[in-house]
Amino acid sequence: MNIKNRKFRNVNILTSFIFIVVAVFYFLNENKGSIGSKPASSLIPVLSVADGDTVTVKIGKKEEKIRLIGIDAPELAQKPWGDKSKEFLQSIISSSGWKVSIEYDVDKRDKYGRLLGYLRTSDGQLINKKILENGYAMLFTFPPNVKYVNEFTEAQSYARKNKLGIWSDKGLKERPVDYRKEHPRK
């Protein structure tokens, strides 16, 4: 191999190495903090909280209902936990100045036409996870929307282990999904 070919080969190896280092750095920075706190991008106003897992927001000039992905909060009629779950979600959103960012997964809407999303506070905290780890909802996943399933499973395990909210001794007696089967929407 002549000197010119060796230099060209060394440049290719160096270029490849630099590309790999930059790609790894980018990947690590993009995924750092994905569990609970990455900066919220483009905040949108929350107009109201319907229950512990559904809010109404304003996107552009349109009002949209957003169903929080990965969680199932007690229905309002499941006293007192439906009300407590709604109040907890309201407290998170009010502490965020009634503004959140939304992150979508694979499916963007549910069968009722609601947007499906992960919500973050203005300081980047993942609201869906906070609700689980404080015991105000239970894990409720539907593939392919499972981006944070591992983090959500850990959050629910924490709440159960520490008997928080619906996992306390006087906690929820019936899963929300079972309650809805007995009391279908009209």
Image (spheres, rainbow, N blue to C red):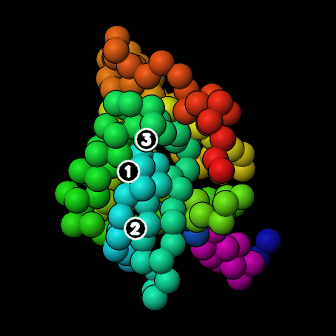
Q: Position of residue 18 (x, y in %)?
A: 54, 68
Name, please, the residue furthest toward the right: 1
Along the viewing direction, whichever of 142 and 88 lies nearer the viewer? 88
Q: Amino acid at mark 2?
A: Ser
- In the rendered view, tell whether residue 57 sits above or below residue 146: below
Q: Amino acid at mark 1?
A: Ile
Marks 2 and 1, the one that precedes in the sequence: 2
Element type where label 3 sits in the image:
loop
Q: Amino acid at mark 3?
A: Leu
> Which circle marks residue 76 in the picture?
3
Q: Residues within 10 Å of mark 1 (few under 14, many from 20)?
A: many
Please say whether residue 86 is one of the residues in the magenta stretch.
Answer: no
Q: Kindly identify which residue carries mark 2.
A: 101
Q: Is residue 124 left or right of residue 141?
A: left
Q: Which residues are magenta?
A: 4-17
- In the rendered view, tell whether residue 131 sits above or below residue 106: above
Which tag is nearer the camera, tag 2 or tag 3? 3
